[in-house]
Amino acid sequence: MFKKLLAAAGVGGAEVETELFTPGVQPGGVVEGVIRLRGGNVGQDISRIAVEFVTRVEQEYEDHEGVRDMGFGWTHVYGPLHLPAGAPAEFRFGARAPLETPITFYNGRHLPGTVVSVRTVVEIQGAVDAADTDPIGVGALPAQHIVLEALERLGFHLRSADVEAGHIRDSPQQLPFYQEIEFSGSPNYPQLNQLEVTFIATEHGMNVVLEADKRGTWFAEGSDVFDSLWVDYATLGHRDWAGELHHRVVGMTSRH
């Protein structure tokens, strides 16, 4: 659907529409599409046309929690230019999804709680900027798929995912947020209420951060326990990941 670009004088302005040729992508992949402009009743000067990815991020404040849409992975498409009245214009683009882009699909299933979109931004001199937003599916990388599948083999049940503002300490994280994928507890590890996994992907490998909610006992209160491991893409198929993760989870259950 075309979105109106308001003209400075209050009369009919230009319109924008974005068509994505790529309905789905993996982190690090390229989303291709075309941006179509149609001039309104008056000519307009456009400072620039760009696209970015957007996701919904949870943020903690001093007295409350909030949710907001946060843009990332900005790609310049064209500009500046003058769009004459009534004139059409088209601009093809390819936007690379950052490797830390939150995933929305795993093993053919949607991850409830995470949404990613492509937003077209048209900046107009002396007028209201316009944005046309289109949702897109982001599938798990092979390394992410293997780790998630291994956790399910250990009896954990994938429940939901969210994106939180902040940084994981001692990780190669670049974006100002990270995704947490939440699993309910496994009957094989009754000491844990739930398990959360965060992926920080890079070009050659991936940092996997595990956070477990450990049940309390008569002798100790419940607590959050953490562990992390590095997945090298070059050796991805040569390790027993279910065995590796079992070893890590057992170690987490024994901590205080």
Image (cartoon, helix red, strand yellow):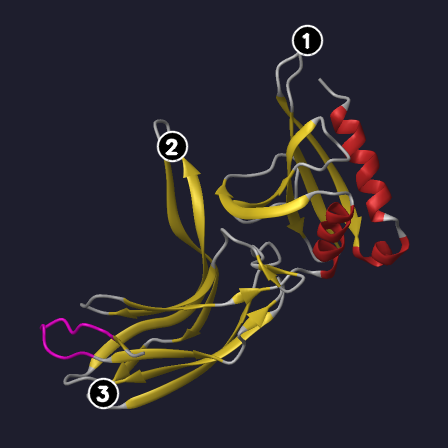
Examine the image and state in which quarter residue 222 appears. top right
Residue occupying the point 62% across, 65% down: 26
Quarter in which the N terminus is drawn: bottom left
The crowd level at tag 3 (other Cα within 10 Å; few <14, some 14-19, many 20+) is some
The percent coordinates of residue 254 (x first, y second) are 77, 22
- State which tag comes first along the sequence, 3 or 2: 2
- The label nearer to you, 3 versus 1, is 1
The percent coordinates of residue 228 (x first, y second) are 73, 37
- State which tag comes first along the sequence, 1 or 2: 2
* The one of 144 and 194 positioned closer to us in this rendering: 194
Question: What is the three-letter code of the residue carrying label 3?
Answer: Pro
- State which tag comes first along the sequence, 3 or 1: 3
* The one of 186 and 53 positioned closer to us in this rendering: 186
Question: What is the three-letter code of the residue carrying label 1?
Answer: Phe
- For label 3, the residue is 84
Residue 184 inside the magenta-drawn segment: no
The percent coordinates of residue 69 (x first, y second) are 39, 53
- Judge whether 60 appears above or below 29 on screen: above
Q: Does residue 83 show up?
A: yes
Q: Does residue 176 show up?
A: no
**Of the numbered discs in the image, which one, if any, rests on residue 219?**
1
- The label nearer to you, 3 versus 2, is 2
